[in-house]
Amino acid sequence: REMGRQFVLGQDIDAAMARAATSEAEGFTYSHDMLGEAAMTAGDAARYGRAYAAAIDAIATACTHGDIGANPGISIKLSALHPRYEVAKTDRVMEELVPVLSHLARKAAAAGMGLNIDAEEMDRLGLSMAVIEAVFSDPALAGWDGFGVVVQAYGRRAGEVIDGLHKMASRHDRRIMVRLVKGAYW
């Protein structure tokens, strides 16, 4: 229970935001995440998409700073937004997941918050990078510096991912936030 309290701020976004408020008043910021995301069906993916959209709406109420970095944000797992998030289904993932993620990114941009994409497992890293670039290049997101990627720093390909993100940012003349994490389960 004590370990869980270190990583889990609340049972839902409202509880998490209430618990975060004290630390935020001291200058800390949070990128809220949902646990247990793994869409097994299209219904699961749609439910997670709605939950992420609702969380963005809730978090937007606390985005009172002009600086995105000073506002709370949200972290998203791509596997939560598609039931067949696998390399063998790349065309289907690109067709079905990219519009959902673009919608969420546009909502976050309008709220002045950061949106971080979890790069997830190494075996799906290429697919994740393709989805990330497809959304990152959305012309509607030009000028928004809140698009971010969470990189597992201990991963063997972490350097390659960071170099790829730098090249992507240069290609599109935009900034990408990068959050290095060791991984809570390491």
Image: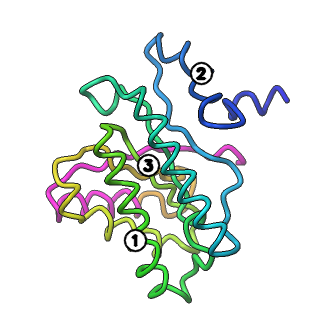
Q: Which residue is mark 1?
A: 98
**Could you give the CA–CA distance between mark 3 and mark 1, rounded to whole angstroms?**
15 Å
Mark 2 is on which residue type? Ala
**Residue at image x 60%, y 67%?**
45
Q: Earlier in the sequence, mark 2 or mark 1?
A: 2
Q: Position of residue 48 (x, y in %)?
A: 60, 58
Q: Which residue is mark 3?
A: 116
Q: Quadrant of the N terminus?
A: top right
Mark 3 touches mark 2? (CB < 8 Å):
no
Q: Which residue is mark 2?
A: 18
**Residue at image x 56%, y 27%?**
17
**Could you give the CA–CA distance between mark 3 and mark 2, rounded to whole angstroms?**
21 Å
Number of the label disc, if any, that sits on residue 77: none
Q: Earlier in the sequence, mark 3 or mark 1?
A: 1
- The span shown in magenta is 161-186
Q: Is residue 125 visible?
A: yes
